[in-house]
Structures are given as C-alpha cells and as structure tokens.
Image (spheres, rainbow, N blue to C red):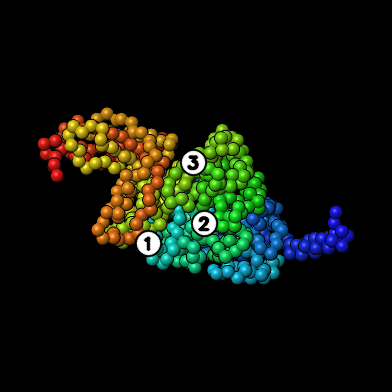
Amino acid sequence: MLSSPTLRGLLSGTLLTLSVLAHAQHTAQGFVFEDRNQNGKKDRTEPGLAQVPVSNGREVVLTDAKGQYQLPVGLDHILFVIKPTGYKLPVNAQNLPQFFYRHKPNGSPQLKFPGVAPTGPLPKSVDFALTKQDEPDQYQILVFGDPQAYTTEQIAHFDRGVVSELQGKTGNFRFGISLGDLVGDNPALFGDYNTVIRKLDLPWFQVMGNHDMNYDVKADSLSDESFEAMYGPNTYAFTQGKVHFIVLDDILYPDPRDQNGYQGGLRPDQLAFVENDLKHVPKDHLVVLCHHIPLFSEGAGEAFRKADRQRLFNALKDFPHTLSLSAHTHIQQHFFYGKEAGLDRVNPHHEYNVGTTSGDWYSGENNALGVPVSTMRDGTPKGYMFLTFNGNQYSFDYRIAGQPETYKIGLYAPKAIAKGQVGRNDLYANFFQGSKRDSLEYRIGQGAWKPMIRVEEADPGLLGVRYRYDSAEQPLGGTKPSAPILSTHLWKAKLGGNLPAGEHTVEVRAKDAYGRTFTGNTVFKVVEASAVSEK
C-alpha cells in the first residue's frame, strides 16, 4: 500500500499531466467548400460542402449542412479532408495534392534532416478547397514501387530509365502514386525526386517507406518529420469514382520489440483512423490499401505484426471488394488472404506486391540509355504498373521499362540442342505479373499446346548474369546484381530432342485468373549429332 505522501505526489503529478494535456488540446474548426474561382480561399459566395469527411489522423467527422466541421487537435496533428467522388484537390507547383493543414505550433524537434517549421497558433478557421470535376467510374492510375534513389546520379537513372519514356503519355491517367522508398535514407533528395515526378504532369500521391524516415528519433510518431514537411500526412484517404483509397505508413520505428531497426505494423491511432474512415464508405465500393511493407508475415519473425493485420482485416470484413498495393521487397508477387489468415468473408483480400522502378537497386550493367538494367531477384525487370478501375472492379498491367507493352513473359531456352538428346533441355517462362492462379502452355511451331508446370526456382537468365560477373577476368561495369531468389511466377517444361534439324519457334501463352491471355516466343535450333562439336 502506498504511503499518504507518495499517494499525494502521484495524484498531484497526474493532475498536472491532465492539466497540461487539457491545455494542449484545442478544437479546430473550418469549412470544406467548393472553390469556384480556384483561388484557394473561401469567398462569401462559395458554398460549403455537406457530408464530406475530415480527419485529424484518428477521428473522422462529416461536415454539416453548411460545410463546417470541428475536430480536436494537440500539439502535433495534421488535419486533412478526405476527397469525395466528383471533386478534385488543389495541387502545388510540383503537382503534389494539397488537402491538409499541419498543426505543429512548436515545429519538429532538431533532427539531421529538417522537419516542419513552427506553425504558430491554430487559425480561427482551417478551410479545405475542392473543385468540381467529372469523375467517371472507369479510369486508370500509374503506380511506382520504390524509386529509392540514394544519390543524384540514381535520380538521373530514375528519370532517364523510367520517367522519360512516360512523358507526354499520361493523358489517360487520373493520378499517380509511389508506394514508398521515394529516396534512399536521404530526405534531402525529396526535392529532386519531386522535380522528376513533375514531368509526368499528374497529381502524385506518396506512400512513406522505411528509407524515407528520420532515423534519429525515439518514437514512431516522429519518424516522418521530413516526410511530413514535404508531403503532409503519411496516413490519409480519398475517393475516386467507386474506389476508396487508404494510404498507410506501415513502418513501426524504432522496432517495438527491441528498439533496433523497424517492424511492419500500424499504431493504434492509425488503425482507429481506418475504422473511423470506413464508417463513411459505401460497402459496395472497392477499398484499396496503399502501403509500403507487405501484410504477409511468415515464421516467428513477424515481418508484419499479425495483431495489426488482424484488426485491419476485421475492419475490412464487410467490404467484399478490397485490394492492397505494396512494394518494399524489390520482387513481384501476389498474396491472397482468406479465412485461414483471419479474414472472415468469402472473397479473399488480394495484395499485389508491385515490382519497382529502381529494380534491383540500380544494379547490373548499363543499357543503351546509360541506365543500369537492374533486373530484380525473381527475374522481373524493373518497371511500373498501369492500374485500371471499372466501378468496383480492377485490372492490372505491369509494364517493363524500355520494352514494348506486350512484353509480359521472359523466356529462357537453350540456343542449340543436339538431335536425340531427350529430357535434358528445359524451357522456362517467367510470367512477370503472374501468380499461382494462372496457367501457362507452350507449343513448338504449329504443334499442339502442352501444359507447363509452375515451379519455385531461381530465374535461369538471372543466374547467367551472376555467372558472367563471377567468371569475368576483369570486373564488369556497374554493381553486381543481388543473388537470385525463388520466383513465384516461373513455369517450366522439357524440350524434346527428337525434332528435325533446323530452327524452331517455341511459343508460350499465359492465361491469367482474370480471363486475359498473353503470349511470348523465342527460337532454338536442333543440330544433327554428326555436326555437334567434340571440343
């Protein structure tokens, strides 16, 4: 039992803490309005917009009939509007959406990379401008995984190797989004990254990645100070057509287990935001989660905290149409979460872990553009995704940088086969955007189609690249690629040796789970045994 002086001290300290907290809490208020003259200010004749969600990062409230809202704020909050269908957000000179107000009266703490400057007292009215726009149910967006440039040279690689080929060709897209790791541990490069992205002439949203953080902090809530200064909130939402996007910073730093490194997961305030936000989303909408670290977690390590994933799945269980977009791994793969993963509904939750624009961290020899080839460890070339929505349905199209849009399958086969050598020569097909739900077939010439077998092996083409680096008498140019890993989208078949001598075309077709068919082909030759060199 505590002594009276000790108890009085504790009570006094508790009251003091509550007093400080009460003093720190304020009520923010303002309007969401239709900005008819697009000057960013609410003029007397411009109407407020009713039933529009506004958030402080945890609570979500709807504006009243006059477009007004109220929300509690402390000393470190970002207020933001959740864009409804039929309206567009203002953007700044770099095409970054401006839908938020930072409330940090004292500014960020002193850090290696600067954060938010002191914002001063809370304004009397924090208003958010929206402009009407036609918003069809069918549209496309452009998705980038991990630009992750560590230097200005790599920023230039990102520009020449990816962005330049898309310039002037983005008219059919509504917006773009990068799925984290915009830079490589250097927030000072955010501005250079923005300058390159601006060339695409699209509103561009950002997801925060583990390489976009401030590492010299002791609380996860402060790990985004530089990101916040440039881009605003790292957890937010908006609606486009019949699709509701929720952007999440899913990196816990420092790692809550041992304070070293980071862990995938979400803070309680972020999970509360998701739950509160979804209260205002129609159940027939497609809900798209955009986050950096995949939700997948295997073994005892919990790369993503399972309790957080479970609470997220609980929030999604009444929404039959959901999708996750993640990056981080620098490979390409699909996950389908069902009841065995804790999602209590019929339709599984699909997570597309998207390939990256930096590929295998800008490794490999330079191509004709002077940019590293940078094939990823699962054999997927670097690239980006076209994501198409039609109501609450979606389809995806991963595009290989520097290749025709039809290039979906990487083929590997021997260049020459000795006639009569049966069962010793393999055909491999890497269907870059494929999954275990797809099927592949092959045929030689105009022969019958035969099934290929899905295997989990290293991509043989990438193994060959690594061998060239290892066997070269002098070091090859560029950075040696990372060691290949088992690919989840690789298929295999045996090439027979009883074909007539001469050149043969082998064709492969992939039929995916969405009813689409993709093809690729390559050639090999069969050589008479008498012509085979004995050397």
SS label for mark 1: helix
Distance between the alpha carbons at the discs numbered 3 and 2 = 20 Å
**In the foreground, 295 or 127:** 295
Q: Residue at x 60, y 70 (%)?
A: 110
Please give the label number shown on residue 209: 2
Image height of 123 relative to 315, above or below: below
SS label for mark 2: loop
Earlier along the polypeptide chain: callout 2 or callout 1?
1
**In the foreground, 125 or 298:** 298
Which of the 4 image quarters holds residue 316? top right
Q: Residue at x 47, y 61 (%)?
A: 183
In the rendered image, residue 111, in percent from the top left (x then y), is placed at: 58, 69
Visible residue check, residue 388:
no
Q: In the image as oriented, which residue stretches furthest toward the right?
A: 4
Q: Which residue is mark 3?
A: 335
Query: Circle 1: is it few (<14), some (14-19), or many (20+) Cα within 10 Å?
Result: many
Earlier along the polypeptide chain: callout 1 or callout 3?
1
Badge 3 amino acid:
Phe
Q: Which residue is mark 1?
A: 157
Please give the label number shown on residue 273: none
Which of the 4 image quarters holds residue 1? bottom right
Badge 2 amino acid:
Gly
